[in-house]
Image (tube, rainbow, N blue to C red):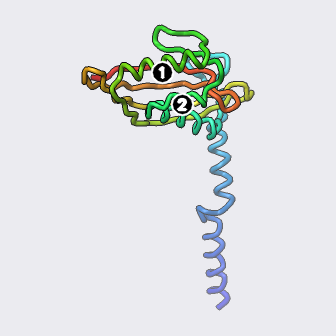
Amino acid sequence: MKQLLMLFLAGILYTACNNPNSSTNEAAKDTAANAATTQNMNYPYTIDHPDYWENGSQQNTLNALNSLKAWENRNMDESLKYFADSIHIQFDGIDKIVPKDTLKAMFNQSAAMTKNWKIKMQDWESVISNDKKDEYVTLWYRQYHENMKGVKDSTDIINDLKMKDGKIIGLDEYTRKLH
């Protein structure tokens, strides 16, 4: 009987020590994961601040997405309420700081040349620098559009939106035309 009891206790002890859900095993996994993410990497290129970003504000993401959705719906006033009074814009061939009125005129001009457009969002990410000085929201999406002559086309777009106090202070756009 004692042997059966000892065998039973040994089995329980063995199971407890090898339980994949035990806190000891979980702590070891967390330590290994943290070590993997904090090790020094020998990158083939150098920059001033490698591995400089962490997850940013969800509110910034919401503001950026609300602005884009309002633009998609051709509600330029609603879109622009998420922008600061002056915005550093960078598009193909344009790199300047403009007041919100100028950006509104640019938005309205693009709307006047386009019969309709539709956005299919692919992904987004909000980041903040480790020193908390720079915040960005990046949006990846495909824009389907039709010009006034009825010609349909699509473009892959990446928007890097620099944020400050919940407002867009920079808009950097990269495009790739699709056919």
Q: Residues within 10 Å of mark 1 (few under 14, many from 20)?
A: some
Query: In the picture, residue 77 is in which quadrant?
Result: top right
- Can residue 90 be seen? yes
Q: How many numbered circles does the render carry?
A: 2
Q: Where is the C terminus found, in terms of image quarters?
A: top left
Pointer 2 with pointer 1, Cβ within 8 A: yes
Q: Amino acid at mark 1?
A: Phe
Between marks 2 and 1, how big is the CA–CA gap? 10 Å
Residue at image coords 66%, 32%: 166
In x, y percent, where is residue 21?
61, 63
In x, y percent, where is residue 127?
62, 32
Would you name the residue on which mark 1 appears?
A: 107
- Work out which residue is located at the far top of the displayed protein and give it: 93
Query: In the picture, residue 153 is in which quadrant?
Result: top left
159 vs 9, nearest the viewer? 159
Of callouts 2 and 1, which one flags the residue occurring earlier in the amino acid sequence? 2
At mark 2, the secondary structure is: helix
- Can residue 140 be seen? no
63 vs 128, nearest the viewer? 63
Residue at image coords 60%, 70%: 15
Would you name the residue on which mark 2 appears?
A: 79
Q: Amino acid at mark 2?
A: Ser
